[in-house]
Image (tube, grey):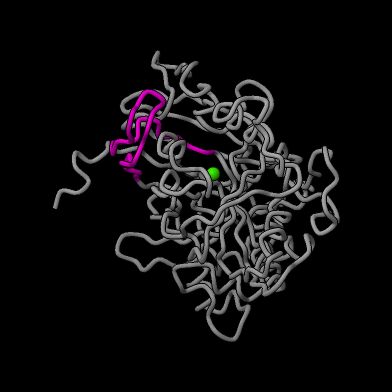
Amino acid sequence: MALMRSWLESANAPGCAFPLNNLPCGVFGRDGEAPRCGVAIGDQIVDMAAAESAGLVQLADAPLFGAPSWNAVMEAGPATWRAMRARLAELLGEGTAERAAVADYLVPQDGAQMYMPFRVAGFTDFYASRQHAFNVGTMFRGPENALPPNWLHIPIGYNGRSSSVMVSGGEVRRPWGQVKGPDDEAPRFAPSARFDIELELGAVVGQASSGPVTVAEADAMIFGYVLLNDWSARDIQAWEYQPLGPFQGKATATTIGSWIVMKDALEPFRVATPEREKPLLSYLAEPGPMLYDIALDVALTPKDGAETVISRTNYRTMYYSAAQQLAHHTTAGCRMDVGDLLGTGTISGAEAGSFGSLLEMSWGGKQPVSLSDGGVRSFVEDGDTLDLRGRCIGDGYEIGFGECRARVLPALTDPYAR
Ligand code: CA
């Protein structure tokens, strides 16, 4: 596929994250305006609520785009998702007769406030990067027990908290929690000294299910993908995680990107999962390529400092796809809802410089990461801003994921002060 040209010149610019091929979904508002659905194009946002009110975009009997979330659009189903993309391609494509009509409903991205793009029904986080599982397992249990015996058979996950999910642009306060280091005789309650990031993608479930679904059905249920930073307090996690998995170590915040990149925009970038090391049970068989070639970066900017890109990796390195994770999630009868969010798990490649967490980059703090301004990091420090970035590189165009950013605030002096 080549660049789909728009009459909006900023959408055709080389390196533009939001060409006509992309059309990602967000929720926006300017000062004092009610948040509503918008679609990014070039350096603008199509005000979908206003375009719908004006009759330019009509996909259902009742309004779909006036709400501060994409849940109603997702619920309307894949035929509506495709009809929306086709209508926007008409309105925004080069040579349209409707240019003047739609131009009235474009809002500059610059100066727009972005909100949570969807109402998160449930949040589940997985553990699907073989390299990440091996790295963390090696540090927590030693190299001989690194990969749990079930790992090559099950997409391992845990149920997180939808209340912890926040949109890009916010602040994350360093948590307090119960910790016990190897030299401590007893656990202590203290601010996390090993607060970390996890570079992930999130699959946004756009259709509900009741009962087990196949991998193909699961793929069809996915509306799109967002960047996802799963903040993790490693010291809290290390003390609490056995036997039921992470709990308070992952409860502080999960930052997601402002824009949902729809699955249709990613179709040209589909790639297969790596070769299976052990045959999978048949319910996990993939009917076709279920991963995507998405280049991913993590950038760290200290307070008053310069940015350093601390990791470069790719979603295509994952062992399990989001469709496999979603299919597995339903096997025991779990109902899935519109707005469920499935984290892929930390995305770590095999090469140096491609790990998705500071825990791995600094190897548990033993080899601190060097920053461009002379500083070093084993874990995040107060005042640091973390940016995740993602893009697919097509033939003369890119599909960008927009901003996924948060800044770290210092721990409270006393979390129980009233
Ligand atoms: Ca995670």
Farthest residue toward the top? 374
193 part of magenta stretch: yes
> Horizontally, is 156 left or right of 212 in the view?
left
Q: Which residues are magenta?
A: 171-198
Q: Quadrant of residue 187?
A: top left
Q: x and y percent of residue 65 in the render? A: 51, 72
Farthest residue toward the bottom? 61
Q: Nearer the viewer, residue 71 or 191?
A: 191
371 shown above or below 21? above
Q: Is residue 82 visible?
A: yes
Q: Quadrant of ligand 1?
A: top right
- Seen at 53% across and 46% down, the residue is 243
Q: x and y percent of residue 26 in the render? A: 51, 59
Q: Nearer the viewer, residue 6 or 255?
A: 255
Q: Quadrant of residue 414?
A: top left
85 part of magenta stretch: no
Q: x and y percent of residue 399 in the render? A: 65, 46
Q: Is residue 40 visible?
A: no
- Seen at 83% across and 53% down, the residue is 281
Q: Quadrant of residue 275?
A: top right
Q: x and y percent of residue 286 in the render? A: 83, 54
